[in-house]
Image: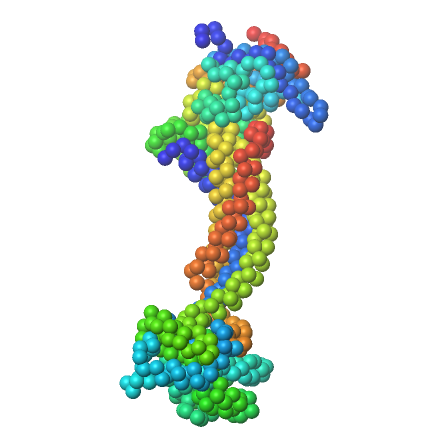
Amino acid sequence: MTENTPYIAISSIRKGYRLGAEAIPIFSDLDLSIPRGDFVAVMGPSGSGKSTLLNMLAGIDGPDAGTLRIGTSRLDQMGESARSSWRAHNMGIVFQFYNLLPMLTAAENVELPLLLKPLSRKDRRNRVEKVLDLVGLAGREKQYPAMMSGGEQQRVGIARAIVSDPGLLLCDEPTGDLDRKSADEVLGMLRFLNQEMEKTIVMVTHDPQAALYANRTLHLDKGNFHEEKRAA
Amino acid sequence: MSTFIKQACVMIHANIFSLRRRLAISVSMALSISLVVCVLAGFLAMAKGFEVALTGAGSPMVAVILGGGTNQEAGSDIPADAIRTLYAMTDDIGVSRESTGSLISSREIVVPVDVKQFVDGTTRTLALRGMDADGPSIREGITLSQGRFFTSGAREIVVGDRLAAEFGLGVGDTVRLGAVDWTVTGHFSAHGSAFESEIWADLDAVRAAFERQGQIQSLRLRLTSSASLKVLQDKLATITAIPLVAVSEADLYAAQSGRTANLIRLFGWPVALLMAVGATAGALNTMMSSVSDRTVEIATVRALGFGRLSAFIGTWVEAVILASAGAVLGIIASWLIFNGWQASTVGVNNARMAFQLAVTPSVMLTAGLLGLAIGIIGGALPAIAATRLPLTAALRARG
């Protein structure tokens, strides 16, 4: 892979769903390139295929045809189990509704991805403390999600997504359930992760203000991307 | 610790600590399983109690001779000639002898008699056993708890402790059995065995009162050792006038208890299994609702990279834990309700036999395993369903 090779390369992707006897096409010939270290916002109306795209990038769903490469891995050629393992080691996901396990503390939630790695308890604890400190939640390790605000819960979600130090972060409406102030804090944190820690971020959002935190915005409509031109 | 075990531990932890969200349905599942366990334990305790009462009555050191081709005392008849022939044998026939050389034996007859119950005045059929003077001592574990044994020829009876309490037969009381009155001279204990359900009296007095002169139904003999039964059987084979069989008292009662106990189990198991099918459906429903309740959590950890097996284990273990709780509850309830409960049935000689239900460790284990099986079977399908949840649920559902 050369320096110019995109980190995420989607080529001639075809994807559709069946609704009874009817076939519903989502993408018929989708292409997309995202270089390493980019921060891309994906916007589009409901039903445009944003979630389908995110599911495919996360390896939760596979394309019907075409190639999907992230880094050096061909996700379109992997089985479900291999994609699951790949996801555990290469990607973090930030969910719209945080998806924290309510019966686990903040630290235990953040620790979840590390349980898939051969790390000692001490190493895991050190990493958890470090990322909780990074997202501004030092000292809140033992608090349960119900004891935190929405913004704080999303920061725990971000800590969980980056604790295993993945190269790619997929964010699904990360501010969709937050007030403006909390949303700005979370988005600022994502920008920090992109600029200071060189994480590649793909963020699906409906919020134009959120999209402004990204380096570029792609509009998905009728199965094709259109890049938004921004004022200099 | 391997990553798989860590994943499974997290899933089990998440399941158990989310139980309070579905407390009502989880408790109902545990209770339905406890009911099944309790019912089965009740039937098994009944069968076990009956077995204990009868097998406790039999000793391998006592031989019972029956005549007339039957293996039960009720239809047996031993001619006096045959007994005289046996008593005349002076060589070793495997039977212990008195210092005088006579065989330690007891000729016996059992007559069903109607006795009015102390509590509600209803009449029950009991076994009145006429026996020789050696009758009580030839048996093992018989102790006189009150009064004295009957005297030869007198219309006196001794009563088992259980009967005495239930029928209000105090020492010195007079009770009408058949056409004549009898005086209670004592109570005896047989450690809860079937003997305690009998009334004992002198053989000649019983035969005279019930016009059974000359009749002998069984002959009990104390063996020199449990192995000497074979010697006795060989000697009996030389008496060709009438077919006589010699069995150990232990085998006689074990065979009789086996039939009734199996009958009780034959009723108990289908009832319990039918209930278990219902409880399994309930468990399946409960666990399906558990999976539905935890859809986002399961899909989230699967999206993070957790394997399918951890989702399966988490759900299955929850089902097994709930089933175990139900089984333990059922066992405790059955022990509190049934253990030591007095019951009675038509026992040997068509007379009433009292016994105590016995919730033994084997009863608890069997009933408990059925409860556990309900959880294992009822939890398996939902556990498989948990592994097949669409992960897209994690990306869109509100947690």
**Could you tell me which quadrant the N terminus of chain A lies in?**
top left
| Quadrant hosting residue B360 | bottom left
Give me the residue at 58% from left, 14% from top.
A66
Residue in front for this viewpoint, B136 or A70: B136
- In the image, residue B366 above or below residue B340: above
Outermost residue toward the left? B99
Give me the residue at 47% from left, 31% from top.
B306
Give me the residue at 47% from left, 35% from top.
B310
Give me the residue at 54% from left, 18% from top.
A76
The x and y percentages for residue B244 are 45, 76
| Quadrant hosting residue B9 | top left
- In the image, residue B125 above or below residue B28: below
* Residue A168 visible in rendering: yes
**How many numbered circles does the render carry?**
0
The x and y percentages for residue B312 are 50, 38
* Residue A138 visible in rendering: no
The x and y percentages for residue A38 are 50, 13
Residue in front for this viewpoint, A216 or B249: B249
The x and y percentages for residue A70 are 49, 16
Tell whether A197 sits left or right of A150.
left
Tell whether A95 sits left or right of A139.
right
Residue in front for this viewpoint, B1 or A214: B1
- In the image, residue A177 above or below residue B269: above
Residue in front for this viewpoint, B101 or B90: B90
- In the image, residue B294 above or below residue B256: above
**Could you tell me which quadrant the C terminus of chain A lies in?**
top right
